[in-house]
Image (cartoon, rainbow, N blue to C red):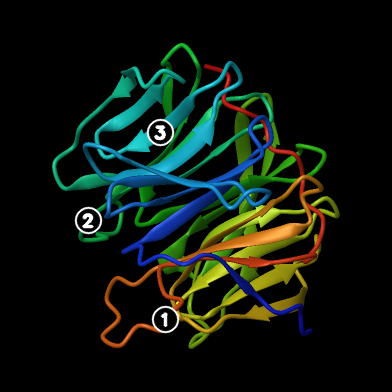
Amino acid sequence: MSAPAYEVAVRAEATLGEGPTWDAATGRLLWLDILGSRVHTYDPATGRRTVRTTEQHVGTVKPRAGGGLVLNLRDGVGLLDADGTFRWLHHEPVPGRRANDAAVAPDGALWAGTMRYDEAPGGGTLSRITGDGTAEVVLDDVAVSNGTGWSPDGRLMYYIDSPTRRVDVFSYADGRVDDRRPFARIEEGAGFPDGLTVDADGCVWVALWDGGAVRRYTPDGRLDRVITLPTPRVTACAFGGPDLTDLYVTTARVGLTAPHPTAGSLLVVPGAGKGLPQPAFQG
C-alpha cells in the first residue's frame, strides 16, 4: 500500500491551502488559501506562479468554459472574467457562514458547499448552481461541506461532510441525486476526510485532515493505497499535468503550533495514477 514519494511543487505558507484543480485550457494548476483570501496558479512546465487576492474568504476556484474563473466566496458564487472583471452570479450572504469546497458536475453546474465558521452541525449546505445563476439547495443539514466528485460514467456522486468521518455516495442523473449511502468510513485516529478526487479507474482519493495522508479507495470501497505526507493537515487532492498523472495535494498551517516546513505548501506525487478530465463551469 505504499506509494511514490512526494515533492514540493510550490513552497508556501498558506493558512488553509485548498482546492487544487487542473485547468487544461491553460496548463496551470489552480489552488487557493481560503483564510488568506488568495487564489494561486502554478505552471509546472515553466515554474511560473501567480497570486491574486480576493476581497473575502474564497472556498473554491474553477475554470469556466468560456475563459475566466468561477469562485465560491464567503457571500456567494461569483464570476471572474479573463480581464479581471468580477460580478456576482449568486449572492447570498449569511452571517457566520463561509464558502468551502465545490466541484463542477458532468453537466457543467457547480455544486458549492458552505459551512459555519464555528463548524456548527447543520450550519452548512450543498447547493447546485447553474450558469444563469439559478441556485438549488440539495443538502441543508451539513456541518463542513467538503469533497465532491463523480464516477467516470457520471452515475455516482461522492460527497464528504467531514465530521461524519464518512465518504458517502449518491446515485446521480440529470443534475439530481438520491439513494445516499456510506461508501467508506475513516476510523478513529486516522483524521477526518476532507477533499477528494476520482480517477480514471473509478477509484476515490481522499485527503485526510489531521491524518497526514491521502488514501485511495477502489470502486467497491476497499482501501488499497495510502500516501503518507509529512504534515498532518492535508486538505485536498487532484490530478494534473498534461497527462493527468501527477497528484497535487494542498495542505494547511492553521492551528498547528509547530508546523512542518511543508505545511501550507502545494505538494505533488508524480506518476501517482491517472486522473479524469474535469468539466469547466458552464457560465
Crowd rating for badge 3 (residues with CA inside 10 Å; few <14, some 14–19, many 20+): many
x, y (%) of residue 144?
37, 57
Residue plotted at (50% across, 85% down): 188
- When asked about the image quadrant of residue 215, the answer is bottom right
Q: Which residue is mark 2?
A: 117
Residue plotted at (65% across, 75% down): 6
| First-in-chain label (1 vs 2) | 2
- When asked about the image quadrant of residue 280, the answer is top right
**Three-letter code for the amino acid on which mark 2 is drawn:** Tyr
Could you tell me which quadrant the N terminus lies in? bottom right
Q: Which residue is mark 3?
A: 71
Dots 2 and 3: beta carbons under 8 Å? no
* Residue 269 versus residue 88 in the image, above or below: below
Marks 1/3: CA distance? Answer: 29 Å
SS for tag 1?
loop
Left or right for 251, reference 28: left
Viewer-closest of 20 and 186? 20
**Three-letter code for the amino acid on which mark 3 is drawn:** Leu
Dots 1 and 2: beta carbons under 8 Å? no
Numbered badge on residue 261: 1
Crowd rating for badge 2 (residues with CA inside 10 Å; few <14, some 14–19, many 20+): some
x, y (%) of residue 81?
43, 19
Left or right for 241, reference 131: right
* Residue 164 versus residue 262 in the image, above or below: above
SS for tag 2?
loop
SS for tag 3?
strand
Dots 1 and 3: beta carbons under 8 Å? no
Marks 1/2: CA distance? Answer: 26 Å
Residue plotted at (30% across, 31% down): 76
| First-in-chain label (2 vs 3) | 3
